[in-house]
């Protein structure tokens, strides 16, 4: 996927008359069209259509080019926005596989909610863990390994593969969507099931100020990741204080209590079954 970061006005600066002329020349030759295009001393001969631009000053041409460039940029921006919107929809589909191809160490430092981890070096040997019938979004730290993973999957007949670039890109789109869905935070936990397979279960939980998740235990080791707010975890006669983007590994079969300290507290529990 291509990401552009520019303003329309910046493009106009580079659209000089001479450069534009050579662009038109390439355009016409590429489409094997013979056209007479006359601007001052420049002429291209034609066999079926003739375009004469007479008494056209440089400034008139410049402003004409400006209008064309703005139109092209608007079209490009619209197409990219539509593609980005589609990627957000794919990422937030509960059936989509979010594939983090970083190392386990990187993955444990933080990954988008709902993601699974298959390092890029292991991917060719673990393709059987992925479904060809589902959308797969691949991402890593900078996008290089994700691009390689996308190629590996497509070469092995995975047709619904999407390039998510970095884990930050995917995380931002995923969190925003969840935040809109979970917009009421009170004393009682607000629970939303994100994903459950035979290998992983992920649940999002929202708490208001002083809201509690009491007497909670997990049958398997569970990772808690704070998306927003501040939490206090009372466990083993200790108080673990967590802030936004902090994570905590909850041991199995140990009773504990989670208390929200801010007006809005949002976190996820990730269990590997």
Image: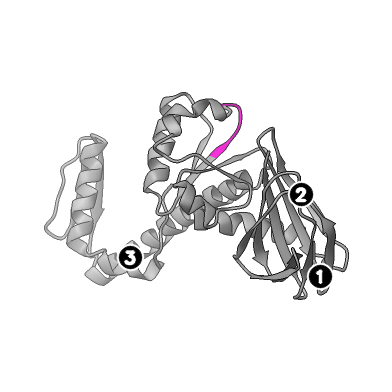
Which residue occupies 39% across, 42% down? 147
On the question of residue 166 being in view, the answer is no
Q: Residue at x 20, y 58 (%)?
A: 19
Instruction: Read off the residue under disc 1.
Output: 208
Q: Compared with residue 263, is residue 90 higher up or lower down, i.e. above or below? A: above
Magenta region, residue range? 132-136
Mark before the other along the chain sequence, 3 or 2: 3
From the viewer's perspective, is residue 273 above or below residue 61?
A: above
In front: label 3 or label 2: 2
Image coords of residue 68 (percent x, y): 38, 59
Q: CA distance from mark 3 to mark 2?
A: 61 Å
Give the residue number, with chain letter if any, for mark 2: 253
- Quarter of the image with the C terminus is top right
At x 53% / y 48%, what residue is drawn?
83
Res. 11 mark:
3
Q: Count of labels shown? A: 3
Front residue of this view, candidates 208 and 27: 208
Where disc 1 sits, the SS reads loop
The residue sitting at 55% across, 53% down in the picture is: 111
Can residue 243 be spotted in the picture? yes
The location of residue 244, given as percent across then percent down, is 63, 69
Checking the image for residue 240, the label placed there is none
Q: Is residue 21 magenta?
A: no
Neighbour tally class for label 1: few under 14, some 14-19, many 20 plus, Cα within 10 Å: many
Question: Is label 3 or label 1 in front?
Answer: 1
């Amino acid at each position: 996927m291509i990401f552009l970061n520019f303003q329309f006005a910046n493009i106009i600066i580079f659209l000089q008359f001479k450069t534009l002329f050579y662009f038109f020349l390439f355009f016409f030759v590429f489409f094997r069209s013979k056209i007479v295009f006359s601007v001052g001393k420049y002429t291209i001969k034609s066999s079926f259509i003739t375009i004469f631009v007479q008494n056209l000053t440089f400034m008139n041409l410049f402003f004409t080019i400006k209008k064309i460039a703005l139109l092209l940029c608007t079209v490009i921006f619209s197409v990219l926005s539509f593609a980005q919107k589609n990627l957000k929809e794919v990422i937030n589909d509960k059936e989509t596989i979010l594939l983090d191809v970083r190392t386990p160490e990187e993955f444990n430092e933080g990954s988008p909610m709902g993601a699974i981890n298959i390092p890029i070096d292991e991917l060719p040997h673990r393709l059987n863990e992925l479904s060809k019938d589902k959308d797969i979004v691949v991402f890593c730290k900078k996008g290089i390994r994700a691009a390689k993973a996308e190629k590996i999957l497509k070469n092995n007949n995975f047709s619904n593969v999407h390039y998510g670039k970095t884990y930050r890109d995917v995380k931002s789109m995923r969190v925003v969507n969840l935040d809109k869905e979970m917009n009421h935070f009170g004393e009682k936990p607000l629970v939303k099931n994100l994903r459950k397979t035979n290998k992983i279960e992920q649940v999002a939980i929202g708490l208001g100020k002083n809201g509690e998740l009491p007497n909670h235990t997990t049958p398997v080791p569970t990772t808690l990741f704070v998306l927003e707010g501040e939490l206090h975890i009372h466990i083993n006669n200790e108080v673990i204080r967590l802030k936004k983007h902090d994570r905590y590994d909850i041991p199995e079969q140990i009773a504990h209590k989670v208390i929200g300290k801010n007006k809005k507290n949002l976190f996820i529990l990730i269990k590997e079954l």
